Image (cartoon, rainbow, N blue to C red):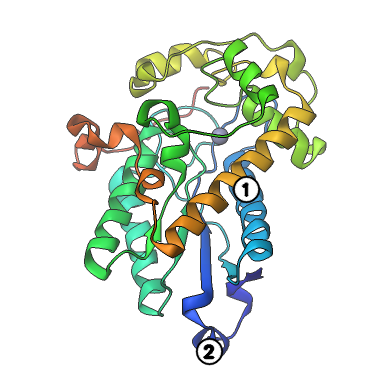
Amino acid sequence: MQDLSLLTWNEVKSLDKEKSILFITVAPIEEHGVCLPLATDLIEGEQWSQGAMNVIEQNSGYNCYYLPSFPVASASVNSFYGCIHFPMHTTYLVVKELLESVINMGFLHVVVVASHADPEHQIAVEKAIRKANKKYGECVIAPMGAFFSADEIGLKRDVSNEIRKYEKEYSNDFHAGWVETSCMLAIDENYVRSGYEELPASNITSRDMISKKKQIKAMGEYGHMGNPAVSDKHIGELLNIDSARYIAEATLNFVKRQNYKIFSHYFLYDLLFMHMGFLPGFGRVKRKKVEK
Ligand SMILES: [Zn+2]
């Protein structure tokens, strides 16, 4: 795999685009509770993309490239220190323009890794991808929306029993809980501040995630939604491998243009009122003095 931005223009020109896959992580700089850094989603997206690129290059004749991550994202809770969010329309425009740029260079297989589960972000990214694919033919897939809504869309996932056990016992872990803290412990323990073992669990259902009020209530004084106290490095290793394998599977299906549609849809995209955020009045990110 290679960082595309370290090539020269004529090197990019001469790449065999039929045999090239371009990965782009699009995720926010935002609060991740009191024990994880602001760049958590970017670090995870890069880790999972790298894992996927390894799997793909070992199992197929494709060469993988990636761009530096784009720290552009939408989210409904903007009131914490460290949150840099954009309106859904901005995220949509950035992703759409970015895709138009790389598609016009001839890239036929582009993978957007939107490693941030907020519905606003997933919907904005999916809209941009639909637009680009409609205009240029199917060139792009963003598999994380389906990953974050596997149960709801009936996507069968082949995950290890250890993860299944955790998911059953500590369900609804959405933000800076055991999933993300474990993933970060596995990437580099130095990313995780001590004290996560003592943090109280905070509960919210996936349906309630569409309500900003309910999210803020669940985040309380710490900022997480889930159960960081039960985080575990070994589980994190399994989760990172699982995410990478999932992205690789979706990508390999996509490059063959076979059975890939199931990997390209986020379950809340179909709710019309979730698209209100694209309207200038509704979609504004509330800028006021940060209190939390
Ligand atoms: Zn996150």
Give the left or right position of residue 35, taking residue 151 as reference: right
Q: Which residue is mark 2?
A: 14
Q: So how many labels did they put on this image?
A: 2
Discs 1, 2 touching: Cβ within 8 Å: no
**Disc 2 secondary structure class:** helix
- Quarter of the image with the N terminus is bottom right
Residue 103 position in % (x across, y down): 37, 73
Q: Amino acid at mark 1?
A: Trp
Measured along the vertical axis of the image, is residue 31 above or below residue 231?
A: below
Q: Nearer the viewer, residue 175 or 135?
A: 135
The picture quadrant where one finds residue 235 is: top right
Q: Earlier in the sequence, mark 1 or mark 2?
A: 2
Measured along the vertical axis of the image, is residue 68 above or below residue 236?
A: below
The picture quadrant where one finds residue 202 is: top right
Q: Nearer the viewer, residue 211 or 285?
A: 211
Residue 99 position in % (x across, y down): 37, 65
As measured in the structure, the alpha-carbon distance from the residue carrying label 1 to the one carrying label 2 is 27 Å
Q: Inspect this view and state whether residue 258 appears.
A: yes
The local crowd at label 2, few if under 14, some if 14 to 19, many if 20 or more residues have their Cα within 10 Å, is few
The picture quadrant where one finds residue 85 is: top left
The residue located at (76%, 33%) in the rendering is: 185
**Disc 1 secondary structure class:** helix
Question: Which disc is residue 203 wearing?
Answer: none
Q: Which residue is mark 1?
A: 48
The local crowd at label 1, few if under 14, some if 14 to 19, many if 20 or more residues have their Cα within 10 Å, is many
Q: Amino acid at mark 2?
A: Ser
Q: Nearer the viewer, residue 177 or 193?
A: 177
